Image: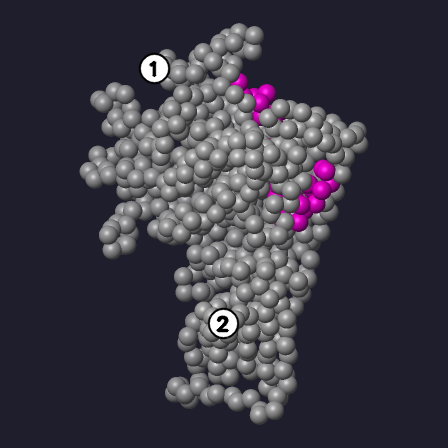
Amino acid sequence: MVVDSHVERHPVELTDNARTVLERRYLLRDPEGMVAETPEGMLARVAEAIAAAEPDPSQRARWAQRFYDEMAALRFLPNSPTLMNAGTERGTLAACFVLPVEDSLDSIMHTAYAAAMVQKYGGGTGFSLSRLRRVGAPIASTHGAACGPLSVLYHYDDVSRLVTQGGKREGANMAVLRVDHPDIRAFIHAKDDGVSAQRFNISVGVTDAFMHAVAEGARFDLRDPHSGAVTGSVDARALFEELTHSAWLTGDPGLVFLDEVNRRNPTPALGDIEATNPCGEVPLLPWEACTLGSINVARFWRAQTHDLDWTALAETVALAVRFLDDIVEANHFPLEEIANAVRGNRKIGLGVMGFADLLIAAGLAYDSEAALALARRLATEIGRAADAASIALAEERGVFPNWDRSVYADPSQHPERPRFRNATRTCIAPTGTIAIIAGASSGIEPLFSLAHYRRMGDGTLLAEVSEAFEAAVRARGCYSDGLMEALAHGARLADREDVPADLRRRFATAHEVAPEWHVRMQAAFQAHTDLAVSKTVNLPRGATPEAIGEVFTLGHELGCKGVTVYRDGSREVQVLAHEPAHEPGTREPGVDEPAAGARPPLASGLPTEPQRRHLPDERQAVTHKFRVGEQEGYVTVGLFEDGSPGEVFITMAKEGSTASGLMDAVAMMTSLSLQYGVSLEKLAAKFEHTRFEPHGLTTNPDIPVATSVLDYIFRWLRLRFATDTPRTHPAHTMSSGSTCPDCGSQLEFVEGCLLCRSCGYNRCG
């Protein structure tokens, strides 16, 4: 661990939210668990640890200072593992890895071990399952039958769950299966039940031939992964419709366009690329890892010239490329195979964040030709500067070891034979928590919301508003508290006629941008990016499977390397950006109510003992049968004379079992709470969205998926009995769904990841 730092620590200007995220997730702690590092100390630790990889010892202090200054100015930040682990001699500095899966028990189990080691170090993993023979195929050596790709997928999901038990959050994974694999239909539906493989993103590896067959309505051959022999055929359009329906239902699968990926493969002599990292933006060969960082492009906007400072941007790009190349050298990898593959190609991926902020500063609507033009120029200039920096590093340190087996050494593909230090230089990766630290919008995504509530540590809700939006509406004389409250509750800015039309377009949020503009923006960056682009195509709840099919088709036509979609409400862990709208006259829980546990003020000013309300000896009751996943049960509610709930009984498991005892305890505490005047709304707020098994699909169309039995029961109680919350919400608001498991705030689905902007929780699987 770096102890004595010689870096001059200029203060870092951070938002309160950024400091919260750093304290919760990044800053080092002492043996008692107390924060023992400042944000400036963290950046100094990282700068010195990475600069220690510089080959000239006499220059390390100078580079450490330059690295620190760039990060402290919030112009550039490396990916989270580097911020967390550099200088600590623990964990890895890379975010994610691709591991090989060959069709043998030895390979399957060795990869399971490798995945466990990678995730133990804090990395995510991607796998191609395309080499595995179909389920039921004969195995000559044992006279048995193959288990097939899905069994391996579920096994790796279990491995990820086991490793997670000792960590802070669930592992992130990606599984890819070729569209011509005989088990492709089963793979498409692998996550439909809302329970299986929930630590995985899944993507279908689609070929140009398949997309052409879909367009022509032709049949498409399925092939044995070993011999290549045709094992059958399918109606390509019907299979595509089946795929889009599953994506409509759950958000999975996404698509990886394998032919486009391999047209841009810098080292085809080393093999085809068959898989990606968990968010899809880094197509990798087996054993390779991601070395990523992002530039906050909004920091380079100059209002005086109404343009970017392109010279300053190029300087930051050059420094960032050097920083990332040093990470490759400084990194400690969990397995020797990974170290050899990573250092053989020295792939890095420099991306961007703050693009939506840049567009707002420039006065451009996200869904405009001018925004696309700026995206193309930005990606071009960053790519050009990154290439120049990598060539300069190669002159200083040498090319990547596999250069002579790369496309760059082939004069028929690159007549100038560029001598790069790094096989790839640019990539648009998820920025999640580092964007929060930088006070920037995520990656190249539009803003997710203009106003929302952030749940604080004591459970209260704090309203937060986009500073740029507030300044804009104040300048135009259309600011009002009512406007901000409506937006925080989920109202669409597009529907607010009290806001000028040009501002409504300029500040359109993710769900107000038409899907085709999401795809076009992704394609604009992809055309000038070495690796791929992490981007979510957000669709409204009412979008059809056909609309998702149009998104996939457009992504293929425009040269994207893959497409990820998210239809509002489609995942088990439903994403929220806003509190549900409340009826006029009701209070926002936790905002203007007394703090949790506090009594309201009394006229006399004297405390009184709570009074218990007793139910009548003969009472009406409601019994409801439920099913969550594979678990059935009953909840019975006894009613007061006025029809309000006064007691709860839960029957779920065998009498005397642990589950039965815990349900009895919850029911008893709930009953007493109701009888002592605690509102059902408050109880539901505490128990909804708790996560444990059993969980999954239900038989109740009003609550189609539950994250636990308690989640289901209290959501049903709220729907059936609560009177202070509307039972239906306007169509434009996010439906009830998941909250952050760490702090209880709402989660967003951006860049292929679940993200909590309050505390930095990030799940990309």
Residue 435, relative to residue 195: is it above or below? above
Magenta part of the chain: 239-268
Outermost residue, left side: 4
Spot occupied by residue 171 in the image (x, y as percentages of width and height): 45, 45
| Observer-nearest of 63 and 261 | 261
Q: Main secondary structure of the magenta part?
A: helix
Identify the image's colour scheme: rainbow, by chain, secondary structure or one colour: one colour
| Observer-nearest of 156 and 561 | 156
Q: Secondary structure at mark 1?
A: helix
How far apart are labels 2 and 1 at the CA level? 68 Å
Spot occupied by residue 296 in the image (x, y as percentages of width and height): 46, 36
Query: Would you call the spot at circle 1 few (<14 residues within 10 Å), some (14-19), or many (20 or more)?
Result: few
Q: Tell which circle, 2 or 1, labels the residue nearer the N-terminal end.
A: 1
Spot occupied by residue 326 in the image (x, y as percentages of width and height): 34, 26
Quarter of image, res 235:
top right
Residue 33 visible here: yes
Q: Which mark, residue 599? A: none
Outermost residue, bottom side: 617
Q: Which residue is mark 1?
A: 396
Q: Is residue 249 magenta?
A: yes
Seen in the image, is 53 located left or right of residue 425? left
Query: Would you call the spot at circle 2 few (<14 residues within 10 Å), some (14-19), or many (20 or more)?
Result: some
Residue at (64% x, 29% y) in the render: 224
Spot occupied by residue 764 in the image (x, y as percentages of width and height): 50, 44
Quarter of image, res 245:
top right
Q: Which residue is mark 2?
A: 660
Residue at (52% x, 89% y) in the render: 614
Amino acid on which disc 2 is placed: Ser
